[in-house]
Image: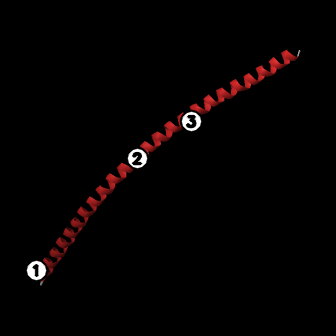
Amino acid sequence: MGEEHRLDRIEQKLDKLTEAVSQIARVEEQMLSVFKRMDRHEKRLDDQEDDIRELTTDVVANSGSVKNAERFFWVTVSACASLLVYMVR
């Protein structure tokens, strides 16, 4: 009887151990999945940072072009207005 009871306890402990090992395996799979997702998100963030840098340089270049075009427009409007006033006089 004592030996049989002891074997039952050992079997129960082995069952618990088996269950714990399978849970550890599941947790490891989940962790790997999370790490892969994090790597993917980091790569996407790096790509977005590169895009933002490119856009920033484009905006700076376009800003200078727009400034010069606006100045040229107003110089032209002022010249036309001055010519009109000169002709009317």
At 21% from the left edge and 65% from the top edge, which residue is drawn?
A: 69
- Say whether residue 3 is left or right of residue 70: right
At 10% from the left edge and 80% from the top edge, which residue is drawn?
A: 87
Mark 3 and mark 1 lie on one chain; the one further toward the N terminus is 3
Amino acid found under the numbered disc labelled 1? Met
Q: Secondary structure at mark 3?
A: helix
| Disc number placed over residue 31 in the picture, else none | 3
Q: Are dots 2 and 3 in contact, CB under 8 Å?
A: no
At 73% from the left edge and 22% from the top edge, which residue is drawn?
A: 14
At 18% from the left edge and 75% from the top edge, which residue is drawn?
A: 78
| Between marks 3 and 1 in the image, the one whose residue lies nearer the viewer | 3
Mark 2 and mark 3 lie on one chain; the one further toward the N terminus is 3
Dot 2: within a 10 Å radius of its alpha carbon, few (fewer than 14), some, or many (20 or more) residues? few
Amino acid found under the numbered disc labelled 2? Asp
Q: According to the image, label 1 marks what residue?
A: 87
In percent of width and height, residue 2 lies at 88, 17
Quarter of the view holding residue 57: bottom left
Q: Is residue 43 above or below residue 85?
A: above
Mark 2 and mark 1 lie on one chain; the one further toward the N terminus is 2
**Label 2 to label 1: alpha-carbon separation:** 61 Å
Dot 1: within a 10 Å radius of its alpha carbon, few (fewer than 14), some, or many (20 or more) residues? few
The figure's colour scheme reads: secondary structure
Toward the right, the furthest residue is 1
Q: Are dots 2 and 1 in contact, CB under 8 Å?
A: no
- Say whether residue 52 is left or right of residue 7: left
Q: According to the image, label 2 marks what residue?
A: 46
Q: Secondary structure at mark 1?
A: helix
- Say whether residue 9 is left or right of residue 40: right
Question: Toward the viewer: 52 or 82?
Answer: 52
In percent of width and height, residue 71 lies at 22, 70
